[in-house]
Structures are given as structure tokens and as C-alpha cells.
Amino acid sequence: MMLRCRVNLSTMIFLVILQGATVVLFCSWYVQLTPCGSAPSNGKVHVVLLSSWRSGSSFLGQAFSQHPSVFYLMEPAWHVWTRLQKPGARSLRMAVRDLLRSVFQCDLSVMEAYLPDNHNVSSLFMWSHSRALCSPPACPLTPRNQLSNQTHCLQRCDAQGLQGAQEACSTYSHVVLKEVRFFELESLYPLLQDPALDVRIVHLVRDPRAVMRSREASAKAFMRDNAILLEQRSVPAAEAQYQVMQEICRSHVRINERALEKPPPFLKGRYKMLRYEDLARNPLEEIRAVFRFVGLEMTVQLGQWIYKVTHGKGKGSKKEAFDITSRNAADVSQAWRTSLPHEKVRRVQRVCQGAMSLLGYRTVSSDQEQKRLDVDLLAPREPYQFSWLPTKTQRPGQD
Ligand SMILES: *[C@@H]1O[C@H](CO)[C@@H](O)[C@H](O)[C@H]1NC(C)=O
Ligand SMILES: *[C@@H]1O[C@H](CO)[C@@H](O)[C@H](O)[C@H]1NC(C)=O
């Protein structure tokens, strides 16, 4: 009797300790998703697709936008940058951050500060690129599980005010906002620490030489943004493009290092870097990994769409890979090597040296080397592929 009792007692103690350990383990595992004990975001995930101009973010954005679980908006910050007079990027970043926070919480009233009187859904920047704005409840046109056609949406889904859009937003598990107007992570810290939000940052970068070539092709379109980025300093036009590239490259380093080298606890596991070139070479696999990182599953229909838009014909000298028309994405990502003069390549390499070595873009030292397309300039990204979340955010049945 005594013995049995003692055995039971020590078994009990053992079980209690085991249970305690399990709770601690589970908690430390879970803390990577949402801090234990904090108010939940109701399972809603908030994704910042952080990129820079001409880096393939429209394409990756579309992959999100077409997903049936995603409410997607392009560039809410565009409204901030275009509405205010002669500002600088530094003074705008908090306004942009607060705008993002409200939109993540599906409060679109914040947009009113930047929109005209009597605004409509069509007042939102590139609104018809958002599948959610073309689907119920925002618009009856496209069933939520089908791919949206921008042309049709543009004709049929405008509506007065933003109530419909706001209502739609709250029915999705994921809100994804694409931004090319963030140049550091610190201003996003309050969002990362907000228990009502579950923020993931997907950082999309691209070879600065390719970005340079692409920006040159439509230089005029960038004048206003350039001025803001250069804090309205007066810089000769020929010089401005290199200074802008330098700012962009510096921001890549700043953001990447901040997120991966001794990140604050709330940033751990919430950042994933992605190179345009890897996306171009392996679109399906890379997008699958990004989806996994934010807790979305790839659908058959999306998989087919991704294949189609990345395996078209033609190098597309005028347009870009991923301009959502079909072309061979991997070819297009190399186009700068034959079309950007070597002198310019050397200058970009100089101003972007740090970023290129950090992100794995090999420099070329001669015109010959530049034009030899069999020389691969993409270094593998092993050391920085590090990420905390991926597999653990997977839900059952997810791919
Ligand atoms: C919004 O739509 C209404 C009605 O169609 C129209 O009168 C108004 O001009 C539109 N607003 C803007 C800012 O285009
Ligand atoms: C969208 O619809 C238009 C007109 O019906 C069509 O020409 C176009 O190819 C469609 N776009 C896509 C991407 O399916």
C-alpha cells in the first residue's frame, strides 16, 4: 500500500514536472508566433511586402493579391508621398507607418487625409490590382477563389466611398500591403510590438544594376520620388540617379542587418529576405516558401498562374519581367548585362558595393565579363537564408 502510494506520488511529481516542462517548451515555441499572454491578432496576419522601385514587387504582390485569403493594397504610402508638399522621406516615415497600422486594422478612414473629397474606391492607388477589391463583399464581379482580371475590375468595381473596401478587408485572414517607400525597419517597431497585429516582413531585393537599367527606362516617372528620397537636395539629374541607387542600396543593408544581426526579440522570425533573381529562376518554389512564412497555402490555380506569367516568350526589352504579361522571367533578369553601358555598371557597383556583397551579387570588372551571360553573377545565399518561423507556422494540411 505504502509502496504503491509512493510510486504514485513520485510518478505524479514526475508527471507534473514533465507537464511544466512541456508548457515551457510549448510556450517558447509559440512565442515565436505570438508572444505568450499577449492579446491575439485573432489569427489575422499582417504582411508588409517591403521592396524598392522596379524590383519585382508588383509580381510578388499579384501572387498575394490573387490568393483567396488575402486582402491586398498596393502602396498606401504613395498617397502620403504625393499629397504633401516637397517633403523628405525622413519626415514622412511616421505618417506612413501610422497609415499602415490603420490599414492593417482595416480602418480605411485614415486614407481620407490623403484622398480627394467624395473619393471612391478608384481613388486608391492601383486599386484594380487588388483582387479583394474586385470580389465580394467589395464587388460582386469575381468570386473570391478565382483569378481577377484588372481590365474588367476597372470597368465594373468602382464604388463610392471606402466602406465596401473596409468591410471586405475585415473578412480576410491576411492583409498584405506592398510598400517601396520604407528605407529602414525602426519606424515599423511599434507595429511589430503591437499585440493586436501579427506582422511579417517580406523584403524583396534586386540586383542594383538591373534596377538602375529599369529606372533609366522611365526616368521621368521617378523625379518626384527621387526628390523626396534625396530630402529635396538639389542634385544634377545625371548625379541624382546614382545617389538614389546609393540610398536604396544602403537601405537594403540597413534593413537586412537590422533584421538578422542581433535583432530585437519582437523582430525574430518575422523577417524574410528574398532576391528577385531567385524568384525569377524558381518562381513557384520561392513563392511557396514566402507563403509558408506567412501561413498561406499555395493553390493549384495560383500555381498555374505563376507558371504562366513567368514562362512566356521574349526578353521584353521595353517592359519588365513580371509586368504581369507572360515572358521568360529568368532571361529578363539578365537584360541589364547587354543593355547597360559598362561605365554605368561600374558606378552602380561602386555606390552599391556593400549591398551587393551582402546580398550575393557578384561585381564584373570588364565589359567582356559583363556581357558573358554564362558567367553567373548570383552567389548562393546560404549564410543569410536563416529564418526562425517557416516550418512551425505550417497548419495541418498545408503544403
Ligand atoms: C466618385 O463617384 C461619384 C459618383 O459616381 C462622382 O460624382 C465623384 O466625382 C467621384 N469622385 C471622384 C473623386 O472621382
Ligand atoms: C482580361 O479581359 C480582357 C478582355 O476580356 C482580355 O483581353 C484579357 O486577356 C484578360 N486578361 C487576363 C490576364 O486574362
Image (spheres, rainbow, N blue to C red):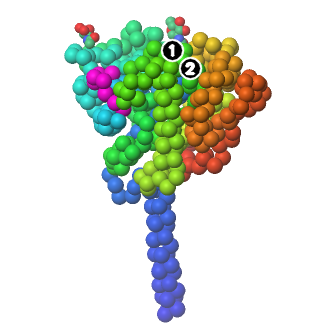
**Image quadrant in which you'd find residue 288:** top right
| Label 2 neighbour load within 10 Å: few <14, some 14-19, many 20+ | many
Q: Does the segment drawn in magenta span residue 128? A: no
- Is the distance from the Cβ of mark 2 to the nearest ligand 2 atom less than 8 Å? no
The amino acid type, in three-letter code, at marker 1 is Ser
Query: Residue at (66%, 17%) from the top-left corner?
Result: 339
Q: Position of residue 277 (x, y in %)?
A: 63, 31
Query: Residue at (51%, 15%) from the top-left corner?
Result: 218
The residue at the far bottom in this view is: 2
User: Which residue is more in the foreground, 367 or 332?
Assistant: 367
The span from disc 1 to disc 2 (Cα, nearest Å) is: 7 Å
| Label 1 neighbour load within 10 Å: few <14, some 14-19, many 20+ | few
Relative height, residue 172 to residue 9 (above, below): above
Q: Which residues are magenta?
A: 82-89
The amino acid type, in three-letter code, at marker 2 is Ser
Label the magenta part by its dominant secondary structure.
Answer: loop
**Given contact means CB atoms under 8 Å apart, are the residues at marks 1 and 2 in contact?**
yes
**Image quadrant in which you'd find residue 143:** top left
Residue, disc 1: 218
Q: Position of residue 92 (x, y in %)?
A: 32, 33
